[in-house]
Amino acid sequence: MTMPSERALVLFAHGARAASWAAPFRRLRDLTARQRPDCTVSLAFLELMTPSLPDEVAALVASGVRDVVVVPVFLGQGGHLLRDLPQLMDGLRAAYPDVAFSAVPAVGEDPDVLAAMAAYCSRAMPS
């Protein structure tokens, strides 16, 4: 029997009205989970889609998670990450004082991610 992990990565995306918009984020979640079998990998949304970050964290904590790292799947540190995410994190810390919470910068701020995106863009123009 597999025991649930006490650690979780939560990929945090914006959300949209079109259900199809979430498909690449679900694929990213699944790819990440295959690379990190030592922890739970899940997906949450800021708005317009479910689960919300508070709802996803509530489910994770109920399953025994005690260490949560939020990975914003945004290209940059805009208003949602400068204002909304810190407020959400403060609320989570207050609701679950025995759980460790942290967040990393937006995925688009990582040099390796930008290099991969630049390579993709470069391939768009035939030589």
Image (cartoon, rainbow, N blue to C red):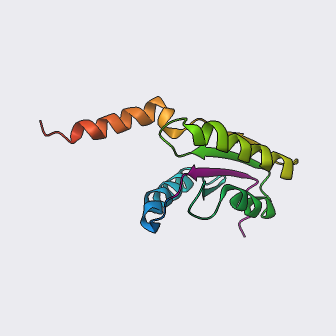
Query: Residue 85 location, x and y as percent?
Result: 66, 43
Query: Residue 11 location, x and y as percent?
Result: 58, 51
Q: Nearer the viewer, residue 112 or 15?
A: 15
* Quadrant in the rendering for residue 122: top left
90 relative to 33, above or below: above
Which residue corresponds to the image point at 76% horizontal and 61% vertical from the top-left? Answer: 58
126 relative position to 116: left or right: left
Q: Nearer the viewer, residue 94 or 9?
A: 94
21 relative position to 69: left or right: left
32 relative position to 123: left or right: right
68 relative to 106, above or below: below
74 relative position to 88: left or right: left
Which residue corresponds to the image point at 44% horizontal and 62% vertical from the top-left? Answer: 23
Q: Residue furthest right?
A: 98
Quarter the N terminus occupies: bottom right
48 relative to 117, above or below: below
Is 73 magenta? The answer is no
Q: Residue furthest left?
A: 127
Which span is picked out in magenta?
A: 1-15
29 relative to 75, above or below: below
**Residue 67 seen:** yes
Query: Residue 127 location, x and y as percent?
Result: 11, 35
Which residue corresponds to the image point at 74% horizontal and 60% vertical from the top-left? Answer: 60
Q: Residue furthest top?
A: 111
Q: Nearer the viewer, residue 18 or 33?
A: 18
Q: Residue furthest bottom?
A: 1
